[in-house]
Amino acid sequence: MVPQSCAFGKRAGGARGGLLGMYMFEDLSERLFAHFVAGRWRVPFGSAACPVLSHTGKALGQVVAAGPLDVTRAVQALRPADDRACHRLAEALAQHSDGLAQAIAIQSGQAPTADQMAQMLDAVGLAHTAKPGILLSTRDSDLGRFGHALGAGVRGGVIWCPPVERAVFATAIACVVQHAEMPPGAFAVLHARAPETETALRAMPLCIHED
C-alpha cells in the first residue's frame, strides 16, 4: 500500500515517534519504499524488487528501481520552488533533524554527528537559484554537499536518485518535503539507482549532479 502522506509525530498505538512515526516504520519488513513524485507517493511502473536492508542485514522492506516510465513521469512533473517554500523546507529539515539522523543510522549503523547535520542544514539555506536537474547519490555521499544540492535543486525542481542503501533516509527527506508543503514537482525521489535508471536519467535534457 502506498500512502498519500506521512503521519508525523505518532507511532501506531499513540507513542511519540517524530519522523519514525511515519507509515513505513510500522512494519518495516513488509514495506514498499515508494517513489515520491509531484508531492505524492507513487507505485513504481516496474516490478523487479530489491531488498532494503539494515546495517545488520535485517530486512526493512523493498524498492523497485525506477525505469524509463518512472523517470519520464518525474521529469514532466518538475516545478521550481520560490524563496518562501525553500524557507519552509529549511525550517522543516531543522525541526526533524534528529529523525533524519536516525533514518541514516538505521541503514548505515552510525548516526551522523551534530556537526554533520548542521552542515547539511546550513548548506540548504545557503544555496541559491539553480536550473531543473537530477541528483545522483552514492551510499557515502557527504551531507554538506547533499544539503547544498538539495537547497539549490528545489529552486529549479530536482529529482533525487539515491542508492538502495539510502532508501530510509531518502523516504524521510521526502516526508519532510511533504510536511513543508513544497510545491508539487519541486522535489522527487526515484529509488534504487540501477543501470536502466541511470540510462533513462542521462537521456533527459537536464543537468546531472553527482555527490
Image (cartoon, rainbow, N blue to C red):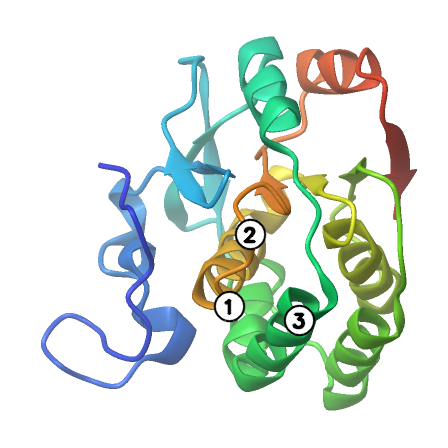
Q: Residue furthest left?
A: 13
Q: Which mark is residue 84?
A: 3
Amino acid type of the residue that numbered disc 3 sits on in the rendered structure = Arg
Alpha carbon distance from label 2 to label 1: 9 Å
Q: N-terminal of the two: label 3 or label 2?
A: 3
Check the image and report above or below for 103 versus 97: above
Q: In this orientation, does residue 22 appear? A: yes
Q: Are marks 3 and 2 in contact (CB under 8 Å)?
A: no
**Residue 105 falls left or right of residue 39:** right
Q: Residue at x 33, y 73 (%)?
A: 8
Q: Residue at x 68, y 75 (%)?
A: 87
Dot 1 lies on which element?
loop
Q: Residues within 10 Å of mark 2 (few under 14, many from 20)?
A: many
Q: Which mark is residue 180?
A: 1
Q: In this orientation, does residue 55 appear? A: no
How many badges with numbers are in the image?
A: 3
Check the image and report above or below for 89 versus 129: below
Q: Quick one: 98 or 51, which is closer to the camera?
A: 98
Which residue is denoted by mark 2 in the rendering? 183
Q: Position of residue 78 (x, y in %)?
A: 65, 34
Q: Residues within 10 Å of mark 3 (few under 14, many from 20)?
A: few
Q: Position of residue 143 (x, y in %)?
A: 80, 66
Q: N-terminal of the two: label 1 or label 3?
A: 3
